[in-house]
Image (cartoon, rainbow, N blue to C red):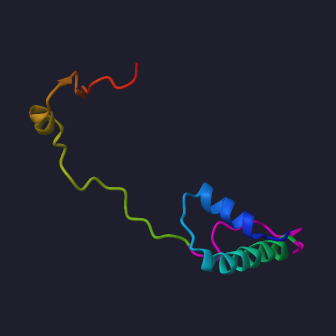
């Protein structure tokens, strides 16, 4: 797929970007290179290869699931503008 000047101007308009006329040729070449790279990646045969969530075979360390703070709900509800049955009341915003 070839990228032309009008394609760059249309994409810039849709993205609400202002592009200087002197930079249009550079952007055209950059976008053409990106699309070429995507085409090369699409051409690779990936049958039999399992998808990966992350390129590194690493797991994230997780902290222990322990309560570290005291329950202060009653304190916060005392200073809230409006509460009812343990819930915060807020103004209706959708009809």
Tell me if residue 57 comes above or below residue 63 in the rendering: below
Q: Is residue 46 left or right of residue 89?
A: right
The quadrant of the picture occupied by the N terminus is bottom right
Q: Is residue 34 left or right of residue 48?
A: left
Residue 56 seen from this side = no
Find residue 24 and report its horizontal and vertical position in percent.
65, 75
Q: Is residue 54 magenta?
A: yes
Q: Residue at x 84, y 70 (%)?
A: 42
Question: Viewer-proximal residue, 59 or 36?
Answer: 36
Find residue 62 and report its horizontal and vertical position in percent.
43, 65
Question: Viewer-proximal residue, 94 or 21?
Answer: 21
Tell me if residue 76 comes above or below residue 32 in the rendering: above
Residue 93 seen from this side = yes
Tell me if residue 18 comes above or below residue 86 in the rendering: below
Q: Is residue 44 left or right of residue 68?
A: right
Q: Which residues are magenta?
A: 43-58
Q: Residue at x 90, y 73 (%)?
A: 45
Q: Residue at x 87, y 68 (%)?
A: 48
Find residue 23 and report its horizontal and vertical position in percent.
61, 78
Task: Answer with the quarter of the image where residue 75 lies.
Answer: top left
Q: Residue at x 24, y 25 (%)?
A: 89
Q: Residue furthest front?
A: 21
Find residue 32 and report its horizontal and vertical position in percent.
76, 75
Question: Viewer-proximal residue, 58 or 91?
Answer: 91
The quadrant of the picture occupied by the C terminus is top left
Please identify the dominant SS of the magenta region. Answer: loop
Q: Is residue 45 left or right of residue 15?
A: right
Question: Viewer-proximal residue, 71 or 55?
Answer: 55
Task: Answer with the quarter of the image where residue 2 lies.
Answer: bottom right
């Amino acid at each position: 797929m070839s990228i032309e000047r009008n394609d760059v101007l249309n994409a810039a308009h849709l993205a609400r970007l202002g592009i200087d006329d002197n930079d249009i040729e550079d952007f055209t070449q950059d976008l053409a290179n990106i699309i070429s790279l995507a085409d090369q990646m699409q051409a690779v045969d990936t049958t039999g290869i399992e998808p990966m969530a992350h390129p590194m075979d690493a797991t994230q360390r997780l902290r222990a699931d322990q309560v570290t703070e005291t329950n202060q709900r009653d304190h916060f509800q005392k200073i809230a503008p409006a509460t009812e049955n343990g819930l915060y009341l807020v103004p209706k915003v959708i009809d």
